[in-house]
Amino acid sequence: MMRSITWGALFVLSLIWSPMAMAMELSPREIYEQASPAVVMVMGYADGGRKGSGGTGSIIQSDGLVLTNAHVVIEERTGKPFARLAVYLKPTRVTGESTSDLSRMLRAKVVAYSQPLDLALLKLDGVNEPLPVVNVSESAQARIGDRVVAIGHPEQGGLWTLTTGVISAEVDNFNGVKGKHVFQTETGLNRGNSGGPLLDGEGHMVGVNTAIARVASDGLAITSISFSLKSSVATQWLREQGVGERAGRGAPLPTGQTQPIIDQPLAQPQAKPGSPPQPDLPLKQMMKPDPAQPAPARPYNLDQLISDRAKAEADLDSMMSEMRGRMKGR
């Protein structure tokens, strides 16, 4: 009888300490419900709304720190952050109507960025209550063949879109940038997914979606080849910015880290005139649709959103100036 109880107890303990019992893999639906409220849409634009960029970000601190790609918030022409940044929080239900899906807007500023690593840290303005956060995992635990999902805003797709896949390869020093280690994944990524999270089976971020391959050197289309910066690279960079282990716990950024910390971009090889695009491109760069095959209407139009947002801000500035003039005249 004693032996029976002992073996039974050992069996129960083995279940308790089993990795499968300790960390059950979630379904894509469960991952989406858990993580998507902490995923945001990021939109940057110059004054006047003539130029802009859009992408995805992850809230990593409940007081409003957002991690995204540098190329989402840095103006290509000037190499500096866009004059205006708008960040949209996920609605309770995504309907496909941008007027309702993008009704929760906060302004943001760039705290730090690294162009070689393609990372940027944003601070949201006007955060009045703790925000949901994406839990950042140690990417060293992720392996080729592990299931992963991405959440973002792919062009010609919907806002807060979920795509699924697996980690297909690992690449160190991506594009010759020392320390830029990435996962290759066949999870569907497109322009608009830039800066969004690549999540493991527990819903933890193991990568920051950053680049895609779409055209081979001979001009043939490439499919299912995308790249995500490993979370271990991102967390190391965050520690250098003073965020460190406190990410996800709502701790404020230390005083003195409020100015952009700029890494100089590495020189990139120049393509010869007429040559096809390089295979690994930032997610904001895509093959243009074949003119003979017009692209279907998108659920949202980034260029129109930027123009509308810039016009709304211009109208607000004009109204405020008029009100100040009236106050002075009294």
Image: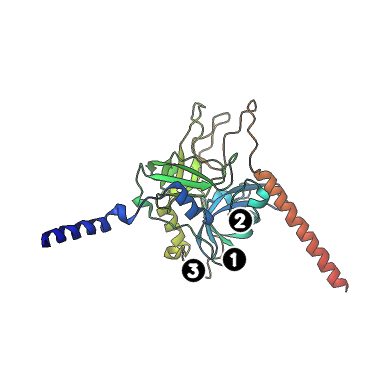
| Horizontal arrangement in the rendering, residue 328 relative to residue 33 (left or right) | right
Residue 127: assigned label: 1
Mark 3 or mark 2: which comes first in sequence? 2
Q: Which residue has dot 2 on it? A: 87
Q: Is residue 69 above or below residue 247?
A: above
Q: Position of residue 37 (x, y in %)?
A: 53, 56
**Which residue is at 56% across, 63% downward?**
259
Q: Nearer the viewer, residue 12 or 205?
A: 12
Mark 3 touching mark 1, by CB under 8 A? Answer: no
**Amino acid residing under circle 1:** Val
**Which residue is at 63% across, 34% downward?**
296
Determine the image quadrant of residue 326: bottom right
Mark 3 touching mark 2, by CB under 8 A? Answer: no
Q: Is residue 224 above or below residue 84?
A: above
In the rendered image, is residue 75 in sight? yes
Residue 251: assigned label: 3
Please identify the quadrant where the C terminus is shown: bottom right
| Horizontal arrangement in the rendering, residue 290 relative to residue 249 (left or right) | right
